[in-house]
Amino acid sequence: MTQALFHAARPVTLVGGGPVDPRQLEAALRLAPEALAADGGGNLALPGGRRFRAVIGDMDSLRDPAALARAGVALYPIAEQDSTDLEKCLYSVEAPLFLGLGFLGGRLDHQLAAMSALAKHPEQRVMLLGGEDICFLCPPAFELDLAVGTRVSLFPMGPVGGLRSEGLRWSVAGLDFAPGGRIGTSNEALGGPMRIAFDAPRMLVVLPGDLLAPVVAQLRGAGALSRQAPASR
């Protein structure tokens, strides 16, 4: 990981080059007013006359970098091709939370790469917003009040075991998950507090998009993620 280009004290809205739901963008900017773009995300005109603080990436999809520079947007070209533009942003910026739009929807390979980036950079707290859904890497422990029947989908990005499970129709405690084995899609909340914990930072949580604000509040207060799993379960 290279040294961070800059630090953000508050959550950041990070825009990629894929489809962006305008309503989700407005909601994200209310929660995280500072905006960054990953390469082609800089082509998007932000609402309300806002400007990106910076554009980061290999710049192969940015249509008019000169115009952005004249508008006062900082450009940080990174030529290496061993990482995606999302990853370049994650290793170049330090922020308490990223709200990522334009990474889900559109091309399937781009969506898979974005979800893989979350698992590759568990030290960064990232939520991806994609129309109907939000998705994030589960912190060491996560708790959220949910209405009865709320969809809670879990997808492992590698081998990972369930340590705690409360408030779910189907308990995940004591279960082993893996991409080619057991997965946890289409679980349901029983109503009230939902509490889950896993033994490694490899489980994606997928929830309905209307839970954006309460999930942001929970993620900001959650414990730090680590690349290492606990020694025992």
Image (tube, rainbow, N blue to C red):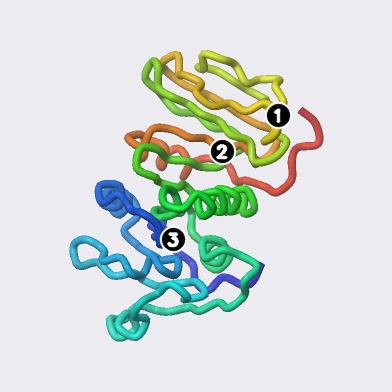
Cα–Cα span, label 1 and label 2 = 15 Å
**Picture quadrant where residue 40 is located:** bottom left
Mark 1 or 3, nearer chain start? 3
Q: Which residue is mark 1?
A: 181
Near mark 2 (Cα within 10 A), the count class, few <14, some 14-19 or many ≥20, is many
Answer above or below: position of 164 versus 79: above
Disc 3: CA contacts within 10 A as few (<14), some (14-19) or many (>=20): few
Please name whichever residue, 13 or 130, is drawn nearer the observer in this view of the structure: 130
Q: Secondary structure at mark 3?
A: loop
Dot 1 alpha-carbon crowd within 10 angstroms: few under 14, some 14 to 19, many 20 or more: few
Identified by mark 3, the residue type is Ala
The Cα–Cα distance between marks 3 and 2, rounded to whole angstroms, is 25 Å
The residue mark sitting in front, 1 or 2, is 1
Three-letter code, disc 1: Gly
Residue at the farthest right position: 231
Q: Residue at x 56, y 70 (%)?
A: 4
Left or right? Give the position of 59 relative to 83. Answer: left
Q: Are marks 3 and 2 in contact (CB under 8 Å)?
A: no
For label 2, the SS is: strand
**Which label was assigned to residue 113?**
none
What residue is shown at x 51% (from left), y 55% (from top)?
110
Q: Nearer the viewer, mark 1 or mark 3?
A: 1
Q: Earlier in the sequence, mark 1 or mark 2?
A: 1
Position of 27 compared to 48: left or right? right
Q: Is residue 203 above or below residue 42?
A: above
Residue corresponding to mark 3: 9
Q: Which mark is residue 204?
A: 2
Q: List x then y, in percent, for residue 180.
A: 70, 33
Horizontal and vertical percent for residue 42? 36, 69
- Could you tell me residue 76's position as x and y percent? 48, 78
